[in-house]
Amino acid sequence: MGSVGKNLLGALNGAVVAIDNASGGLLAVVGSRDFDRLEYDLAVRGARPMASTIKPLVYAAYLRKTGATIEDRLSNTPLSMLEALRFNGGKPIAETAVLPPGRHSIRVGLQHSSNRMAIRVGIGLGWESWEQTASRLGIAAGDYQSEAAAWIGAYPVSPLHATAAFASLARGGSYVQPWLVKAVRQQEPTQSRLATLYRHRPQSDEVFGIREAQEIHKGLRAVMIEGTASRVARQFAIETGAAGKTGTADEVTDA
């Protein structure tokens, strides 16, 4: 590695959040590479654009509302003038170079991270439905605007809230707000037993159904095995059954 590579590596930072999908409890939170270099907690407070990682949630909401399946087909051709003016101020939307223009299944659109298909799904879902879904998933920023950028991940979300939203898919569609403390106990003065002063009882909200969660899981498996993550994750996904989504923002920043 040359000097430029070393300097770049030293400048890179990151965060990790691990959640128990069954309960919503936090298993690990890592706020940065080195506390001495950066005291700011990127995991909890470092909101960044979700980029394409938002797309599975938009698709899941669409399946829930319309009854569509992961194999239903949509167009990834350029947006019509009406679509562009209403939801993107007339600006063109770039498309992934992998997919040729035409109609593709939602699974393929998710697999290759189609921007135009995600926007058409958002239009079909409707802004009010998406806003409600995002709020229930804990990822509504409060300053959302009715524009296509929301459906391709332009708005900032912390790794903590993004992970909790994704966990709803692994949980069969129910969102649970992430939590840290399971119970607080105190030794009774005159007894050997511990008295429970507090016990956390997670509250779940069924944002999606099991059907939608399972359908999206198929698409996320395809991302790992054949799609945008296959170059680095294919064998891991085959061996473990993992499913996931890449989320690279413009110019590979805030990936």
Image: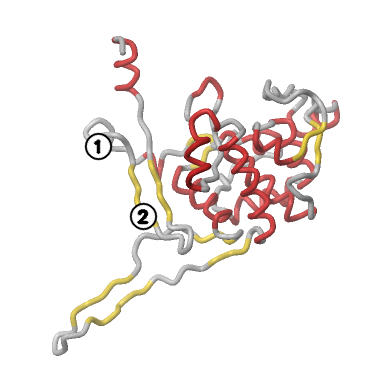
Seen at 55% across and 48% down, the residue is: 139
**Looking at the picture, which amino acid does disc 2 mark?**
Leu
Asked if marks 1 and 2 touch (Cβ < 8 Å), the reply is no
- Which-is-in-front pick, marks 1 and 2? 2
**Looking at the picture, which amino acid does disc 1 mark?**
Phe
Asked whether, in this view, residue 99 is left or right of residue 142, the answer is right
Q: Nearer the viewer, residue 163 or 171?
A: 171
Q: Secondary structure at mark 1?
A: loop
Label 1 Cα neighbours within 10 Å, binned few <14 / some 14-19 / many ≥20 = few
Query: Residue 159: x percent and y percent?
Result: 45, 43
The alpha-carbon separation of the residues under discs 1 and 2 comes to: 19 Å
Query: Residue 32: x percent and y percent?
Result: 32, 37
Query: Residue 51: x percent and y percent?
Result: 57, 34
Q: Which residue is mark 1?
A: 35
Seen at 21% across and 33% down, the residue is: 36
Rendered view: 132 above or below 49: below
Q: Tag on residue 55?
A: none
Residue 228 quadrant: top right
Query: Residue 119: x percent and y percent?
Result: 73, 36
Rendered view: 247 above or below 99: below
Residue 244 quadrant: top right
Q: Which residue is mark 2?
A: 27
Residue 147 shows up from this direction:
no
Q: Quadrant of the N terminus?
A: top left
Rendered view: 217 above or below 120: below
Asked whether, in this view, residue 126 is left or right of residue 173, the answer is right
